Amino acid sequence: MNKRISHTLPIVTLSSLLFACGQQQAPEAVSHQSASQAAATRIATIDIANPSEFVRTQQPLYFSYHDLGLTAEQAKALVARVNNNLVPSQHIDRSGDGNSDTLFVALDFAATERIQLSIYDDAAALTQSNWPVQTQAEISHKIGGEWQDAKYIGGTFQNVSTLTPPPQYTDHSEWIRYEGPGIESDKVGYRFYLDWRNGFDIFGKKTSDMVLQQVGLDGYKSYHDMADWGMDILKVGKSLGAGGYGYWDGQQVQLVSKVGQHTATVTNNGPLYSALQINYQDWQIADKTLTLTADLSMTAGSRLVHTRLNVSDTLDNIAVGLVKLPDTKVIQGNVEITGHAWTYLATWGNQSLSAPDSKLGMAVLFKRGTLRQQTTDDNSHVAVLRPAGKTLEYYFLAAWDGEANGITTEAEFIAYLEQQVAALTLTPRMRYNTAATQAALAQPLTAERALYWGEQLAASEMIRQTPYYAYGGWDFERSRPATFEYTTGLLLQAYDDLLQLKPNPEWQQVISDVVNSFVTEDGNIHTYDINKYNIDSLNTGNMLLRDYLRNPTDNARKALDLLRRQVAEHPRTSGGAFWHKKIYPHQLWLDGVYMGMPFYAFYTSEFENGAGLAEVVKEFTLTRELLRDPKTGLYFHAWDESKQKGWADKDTGLSPHFWSRGQGWLTMALVDVLDFIPVENTELRAPLLQMISELAETLTHYQHASGTWYQILDMPEAPGNYLESSGSAMYAYFFAKALNKGYLPASYQDTAIKAFNGLLQEFILVHPDNTISLINTVQVAGLGFGRDGSYQYYMSEPVFRNDAKANGPFIMAAVEMAKLLGYQVP
């Protein structure tokens, strides 16, 4: 279903990528300096903030060549600098396909520190950099001997980059050194049995040096005795070991045992980042035969193994966990958190083989939303996780008290785990400034150029997502099957807005194909359930109605009437405000005003002679009455009439913060609903126009110098806060459309232009394949079910890219900006 982009970006050569960037203060990096630096080409400058109030040492940072605007060929000589000093970096193959695709950087941050990192094309500096080796991945097997049944006799070991054992290979065959591939950092090492056991074992290290190359050279038993470097410290048996994976059959873990063939490959072996890939061909599990691929990686200074699993067919669960040993304590991380935050299952105690009283901690770390259950069987403590389609991501780690300066108490171990999950949840905040993007932005903003950027993002999404929103497709942003979701309607509506200025038959067709794919022959809607009374479900009705007016069908009309029935039956507060959802009783959210009211206004105008418009306007007046803060002019995210929810103030029922996208939904709803209220109906229009005027004044006050807005609007200096693209795009749309419609005076035109230019400068990345991305979008933000409405909560939600909640408003803003700047329809 991939589509060809019809509008190409200017061709950017490497020699054209040099540009000047302002310097910010950052700590000196003790490193090398290139004599040829003056001749180097600066590719990008990235401002990076530590969002945490604790130190981050050797924070892993990944900069894909794609994001830097470079092909792999152009990126061969990249290096990283802070304050003109080289900092540790390594070219890596993050995808595991055999080709380098990313510049990895390990950077130290003080608490809440901001650092400006510059990336250069500098071949001379690359040859001079020689970073201490802190990671290693390897596998080796014997040659020169012979097989005698299932045991290999004689021979010597050789290292290889990939290995597929022969059919007779099994446990204790003495052919693979320490029985499988290994991976290590300067903290700890792990080995993975490449046989039916699929055990995950630990090499405790007393040194920061790399040791795998010397382990097991003199036999299998040697590493079970303490050596200068350390030893094997875990008894794995038939368990998951130190973080392994399998399948939960309802009673016990089924290991990855019944496998046709194993293949292990070293995909990266470098000083800062090393990785292995293990392919399990023909795994027989859950009445299926499938392929499982595991990518396991470690970074310098870390105990964690990042584990990415991919299966060729869907499984209802993947079980991960830890060996169950006596004299240990099970520790569960916090589960009363948002589903996107990280938590853990851990053990601590006398579970090391190194000495009877030696302490060892182990943990698996995973996103709370993936946890189906925590359980045990005879061998393992188990976290049963829900894959996202065919993929699952988690981490595992071990902390041994025999390490130099290691963790020696349970309290230290828990504090360490809490810091690890906090660091995974609150990712570093990044503001990109790439030469490739700047070259594309060099042309001044005109009506044609504004429309161009909207078309470019729409064309890029035709490749990445839009056609796949159809029923039976896949929502890549949410990693789940496509549904009749508000994001679907939002993005399609953006395409439809584009078509008003420039026809495109391909885009017109995809709109109709996607929205109508959900409508059944009898007028029902696939994936929609009226009994949930979810106001979010109404938004895609806008696009269904637009398409119906062009191509009327009986089944589409019945589907529209079904949505209208939800409006009639939807539960309301005592004052008449629509509940956000049935599962969120008595709650009015800013989001819901946009989700429900434009559709209601559209439908009642087309089919009911506007009979419901008064109720539409009432929703806005109630929102202003209940959610607006008179001191700031900003709107709180939500209100709970019962005042019982954990996030609600016990006196006012209000949530505590001003969330940018929440206000954005409200602003878009205001200018969109006015499209359906006749100009002569001044009484109904007046309160909406008042709200537009108030919000314009307020938002101008909170606009950042870049033209964009923060995730939490009134806390720009708070740790972790960041300029957020979806709210900023919604405000750009609001200002431009309000100006085009005459709702705001011309004095706001500079604000609108500043906002749109800010979107381009802050959030657009131009890629070498002529696609573009919109970055720094908060994926979700809700209330309840582990979401407590605190500042920390809003910071903890993932920061995404190419999310329909930002891309749709960006495209709509581009259309309105083109109109504002005088675009003439051909």
Image (cartoon, rainbow, N blue to C red):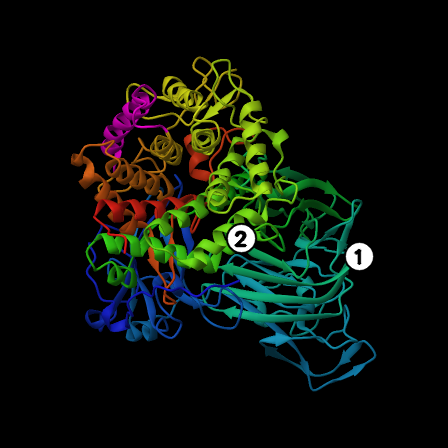
Instruction: Give the amino acid at mark 2.
Output: Asp
The residue nearer to you, when weighing 73 against 347, is 73
Q: Which mark is residue 287?
A: 1
Secondary element at image label 1: loop
Secondary element at image label 2: helix
Quadrant in the picture for the C terminus: bottom left
The residue nearer to you, when weighing 184 against 629, is 629
Q: What is the C-alpha distance between the residues marked 2 and 1? A: 35 Å
Q: In the image, residue 35 lies at what x, y percent?
A: 22, 72
Can you identify the residue that label 2 sits on? Answer: 513
Predominant secondary structure, magenta span:
helix
Q: In the image, residue 755 lies at what x, y percent?
A: 25, 43
Which residue reaches farthest left?
747
The answer to whether marks 2 and 1 mark residues whose Cβ atoms lie closer than 8 Å is: no
Q: Does residue 343 appear in this view? A: no
Which residue is rendered at x = 67% and y = 41% of the image? Answer: 372
Residue 457 higher or lower than 363, as above or below? below
Residue 348 position by quadrant:
top right
In the displayed structure image, the side of residue 125 where residue 465 appears, left or right: right
Asked if residue 684 is among those painted magenta in the image, a careful observer would answer: yes
The residue nearer to you, when weighing 742 against 473, is 742
Q: Which contiguous range is marked in magenta?
A: 677-703
Residue 170 higher or lower than 652, as above or below? below
